[in-house]
Amino acid sequence: MKQLWLFNQINSDLQRIEKELHHFVETDYPILNESAVHLLDAGGKRLRPAFALLAGKFYGYPIDQLMPVAMALELIHMATLVHDDVVDASTTRRGRPTVKAKWGNIVSVATGDYLLARSLELIAKIDHPEVSRILAEVSVEMSQGEIQQIKASFDVKQNLKQYYYRIKRKTALLIEASCKLGAIVSGAPKRQVWALGAYGHAIGMAFQIVDDVLDVTAEASQLGKPVGGDLQQGIMTLPMILALKSTQHSERLINLLGKTDKSQSEIEEAIRLIKDSGAIEESMHYVDLYIQKAKRYLEELPNVPTRKALADLAQFIRDRKF
Amino acid sequence: MKQLWLFNQINSDLQRIEKELHHFVETDYPILNESAVHLLDAGGKRLRPAFALLAGKFYGYPIDQLMPVAMALELIHMATLVHDDVVDASTTRRGRPTVKAKWGNIVSVATGDYLLARSLELIAKIDHPEVSRILAEVSVEMSQGEIQQIKASFDVKQNLKQYYYRIKRKTALLIEASCKLGAIVSGAPKRQVWALGAYGHAIGMAFQIVDDVLDVTAEASQLGKPVGGDLQQGIMTLPMILALKSTQHSERLINLLGKTDKSQSEIEEAIRLIKDSGAIEESMHYVDLYIQKAKRYLEELPNVPTRKALADLAQFIRDRKF
């Protein structure tokens, strides 16, 4: 993981989570095993487990309580990724063919169901009513966000409110839950559970906006997937919504955004129009607002080294190029 | 529901579950709402809630504890149906177009995820460790069965052991859980929880075999979907496996079973060969063995009217033509 230095405090436990996840998803079914391991091996930043562990650092770091929560969070995240790939018709994730492209929709659905079921097993073992409640509520919201994303495909009339509604469900809520649950199972006071959750929520919003910006601006090699994937799939993101407001070529951009099968040059043209409109800078301004918000919530927390680690993490999420 | 007389004791509560399910899955998202309600309206026998309620009848029928469990079971069942339809490429269920045929894979995945998430909400509210544990374990097994069904498509070499393994996960385990959970939340003694579970397991196996037989023998109008659906989708069922053993035309039948795009006349020919081989009678003999088993387990239970209702239900499952 490239940001190892940020996670120094929790690095060996993150590696343990990695091992345990591999063991946990192992099954006698070769196809299921391959696809689940395929997902795991694609890596991913393991952000959500990291947040849970870091939250626990403030309150004595009870690793036996934190570990299953961290694993459950990552399993839920992987399950939603696999199902999102069916929904999104995407073919690469993190530079590797998606489970879907490799085996088709059907295995993706079954693999996602399997990972989710394993997370339920863990949650049942944890046997903590608030943990179960929070994860259930987040799952409901996330699935509603899934549907709204489907409904919103290629809908160029989407506004900011709809965008924020969607990314809150797609990304922010699970990261918020990661922070909160780490705090809750560590016995944090209510006020600080709330503060860590609010930090996680703001970070999650920022994270998704940066993701959406990078989809327009990054090089394919950095991203691990083709640039302009959102454009190709008709997913209206903040840079596009803002570009439509400020570009001098809104009619052309509207046509491009709404077009279902874009050529490579049409994607490049759309990217150019978005960049020229100033929408990228404006998007990053919104990111900065969320990061500032996140850092303010940190002030509620005990002033220990982990607090600085979370602030640095917030900055990293803003500055990252992948 | 056609078997109302069997459910006289619990009929008004089943209607209440129907109402509550409609309210519970209601959401602000029109597409999700439509697809979830579409599923509900297709009816279904609500067997799993019925089993949970009937189990509770032996032990004082604590309806406030039974209701959410019954609802959670039906939500899980509906979620697996919707995802199975993605997996199975089927287009009608209970005489109506499947959610999938109507809206495509993507909405099916999201709808299934939504129903499952709602069931998690309920399970979290129920807050009973054994309920959570059992439902999580069943979900893991069911998803593994999902994958094995994919892997086994058009594989004419499947044997009885593999078939039983698959239908246990697809059907028997959730019906077993329905009986057990009804008993558990009603405070039944351990031995009787086990007996009701074993009854449910045997009933579930019988139910699926009858389902598989009817897929070959029934009229389309009775079935609510085209006859020979399993044949068309390459799902190897008991009648087919037994037919391959006893038919004089095994080579022809092997070819037909393994063929991915069968014509109507090829399906009819396969059906004819299966019927002529005696495989239907042989399959029903296995059903009878399971029904006898189920009835024996009932002897562990208090000799109250509900016990006869369960025995009659077992017989109905065997004798039904739809």
Image (cartoon, coloured by chain):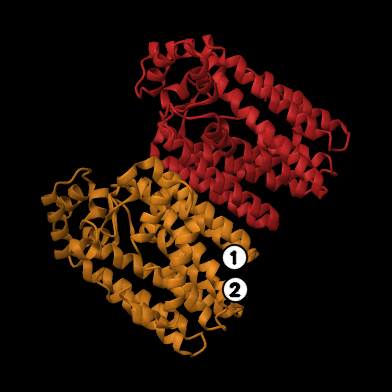
Chain colours: A red, B orange
Count neighbours of disc 1 (C-alpha within 10 A) and say few if under 14, some if 14 to 19, many if 20 or more. Answer: many
Residue A184, given in percent of the width and then of the height, sits at 76, 49
Amino acid marked by disc 1: Val
Instruction: Determine the image quadrant of residue A279.
Output: top right
The answer to whether residue B161 is visible is no
Chain under numbered label 1:
B
A106 left or right, relative to B251:
right
Q: How many marks?
A: 2
**Residue B300 position (above or below residue A71):** below
B308 left or right, relative to A306:
left
**Residue B108 position (above or below residue A82):** below
| Dot placed on the residue nearer the N-terminal end, 2 or 1 | 1
Q: What residue is shown at x 42% (from left), y 29% (from top)?
A: A155
Report which residue position mark 1 lands on: B131
Report which residue position mark 2 lands on: B185
B133 left or right, relative to B158:
right
**Residue A318 position (above or below residue B41):** above
Residue B251, given in percent of the width and then of the height, sits at 16, 51
The one of B132 and B231 positioned closer to us in this rendering: B132
Amino acid marked by disc 2: Val
Q: What residue is shown at x 25% (from left), y 65% (from top)?
A: B213
The C terminus of chain B, quarter of image: bottom left
Residue A141, given in percent of the width and then of the height, sits at 56, 45
Residue B241, given in percent of the width and then of the height, sits at 27, 58
Q: What residue is shown at x 46% (from left), y 41% (from top)?
A: A147
Q: CA distance from mark 2 to mark 1?
A: 8 Å
The answer to whether residue B67 is visible is yes
**Residue B321 position (above or below residue A161):** below
Instruction: Determine the image quadrant of residue A125.
Output: bottom right
Kind of element beneath mark 2: helix
Kind of element beneath mark 1: helix
Question: Decide: marks 2, 1 in contact (CB < 8 A)?
Answer: yes
